[in-house]
Amino acid sequence: MNSKSRAFELGFGKTSQEINLERLPVRGRIPEWLQGTLIRNGPGTFQVGSQHYRHWFDGLAMLHKFSFAGGSVSYANKFLETKAYQEAQETGKISYSEFATDPCRSLFARAMAVFSPKITDSAKVSIARFAERYLALAETPIQVEFDPQTLQSVGVFNYEDRLVGQMTTVHPQFDFDKDQVYNVVTRYHRISHYNIYCLPGGKKPERVASLPVQQPAYMHSFGMSRNYIILTEFPLVVNPISLLLWLKPYIENFRWKPERGTPFWVIERDSGKLVGRFDSEPFFAFHHVNAFERDGELVVDLAAYKDASILKAYYLDNLQSGQAELPFGKLRRYRIPLNGQTASHQVISDACVELPSFDYPRYNMDASYRYVYAISIHPKHRQGFYNQIVKVDIDSGETKNWFEAGCFPGEPVFVGRPKRTLEDDGLILSVVLDAARGNSFLLVLDAHTFQEMARAEIPHAVLFGYHGAYFPNLT
């Protein structure tokens, strides 16, 4: 079996056990100033009994915790204790609708699902802290609170009541200076709405704006600057009746309509007033990177694709052979003139970028930020899954990369050195699947040089996941 097929078997398989290890074996040296915890989210299994999920965005959520102290690192993993997980354990079957997988149901059961759809609560996409609440986040309306010490599920968080008929983004935006958290909830109905919520102090949600829409777009994230919320309405849209009937898995109800173009809707944060619609060509993205205001315009950076074919590329049937070539997402910068009507863009780098990150705590909404980190595909090793990490210099367009044959890294998380003066003075943390050895390791890179400093060996393979967060005061 070649490394690409082996990577698929390991990365899209199942986790056999939950463990708690006080110390992982480390090769190299982890700086002693690294004192905190990385919590990572993603699927813990793509199989329930004899049934398999169909898409990378399906699966049952599992949390992974890496805590650092004195140059050492501990590790624990645990399934998120949701209804979807508990019912799967009890029945040995997939019982809840996921992103691209529906349970096997009789005709009668499908008809009844129209009145009471079982939408997953498997919050497996990202991690955030609202005030003192640690949350596992999903696009579905139920966000799961967990104990960061034990990883035990302890409750749920919702933006709105009436959970059926709504979806949210998995990337809330934080204004640390004002102690505010923002997110967008799409409410599906005959006339749907993009509802924007603010959580002052990270606590009770307050709706600050509502934008009506007839055919809502799929939105995984949104942009925010000091004064504005930016909704990027990609032309991957849905008739809301299709979602309310729920006859197909969630994403299979959406249709690509490039004739719509991609409007940017700009809303004032303080007043909730719509500033305007700014049109651009059709494109697609999962992830906004950063946004800021400069010289009378909004600047929005995204990891953009020419269309939404990347969603089809993530079906496991397409990935199984290890021979598929994923579409490249590229870092684009869009400029929105606030006194105009049309947005323009430039491609910052030709490197493939996905799961992008940067020094968010310091440089979110800041025009001076310079470096973006992302998983990528090596141009000489195009087939298979994401196999390198890149660092893109926005000012020059130059890239640095980390690549090792047979290794498949996850999202790079930047951790800044205390009292640093340079933006890239810090570390990159990434969970890497080693197909040859059959396990994963936590990679530690020098963010400035992009040279490896250390790796901590995990005794099993960690499935291909999505997002994590580093908490410097959590040990």
Image (cartoon, rainbow, N blue to C red):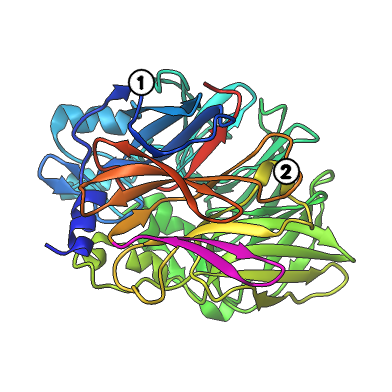
Residue position marked by numbered label 2 in the rendering: 362
Q: Earlier in the sequence, mark 2 or mark 1?
A: 1
Is 127 located above or below residue 425 in the figure? above
Q: Quadrant of residue 222?
A: bottom right
- Residue 142 visible? The answer is no
Q: Secondary structure at mark 1?
A: loop
Amino acid type for the residue under numbered disc 1: Glu
Task: Residue at 76% x, 77% y: name it.
Answer: 342
Q: Quadrant of residue 288?
A: bottom right
Residue 302: image tag: none
Question: Are the two marked residues, 2 and 1, in contact with CB atoms closer than 8 angstroms?
Answer: no
The number of discs equals 2
Q: Residues within 10 Å of mark 2 (few under 14, many from 20)?
A: few
Closer to us: 26 or 228: 26
Q: Residue furthest front?
A: 28
Q: Secondary structure at mark 2?
A: helix
Residue 77 point in image, percent of width and height: 33, 29
Is 301 located above or below residue 57 in the figure? below
Residue 179 point in image, percent of width and height: 75, 31
283 relative position to 115: left or right:
right
Region rendered in magenta: 389-405
Does the segment drawn in magenta span residue 38?
A: no
Residue 22: image tag: 1
Residue 432 point in image, percent of width and height: 36, 49
- Residue 349 visible? The answer is yes
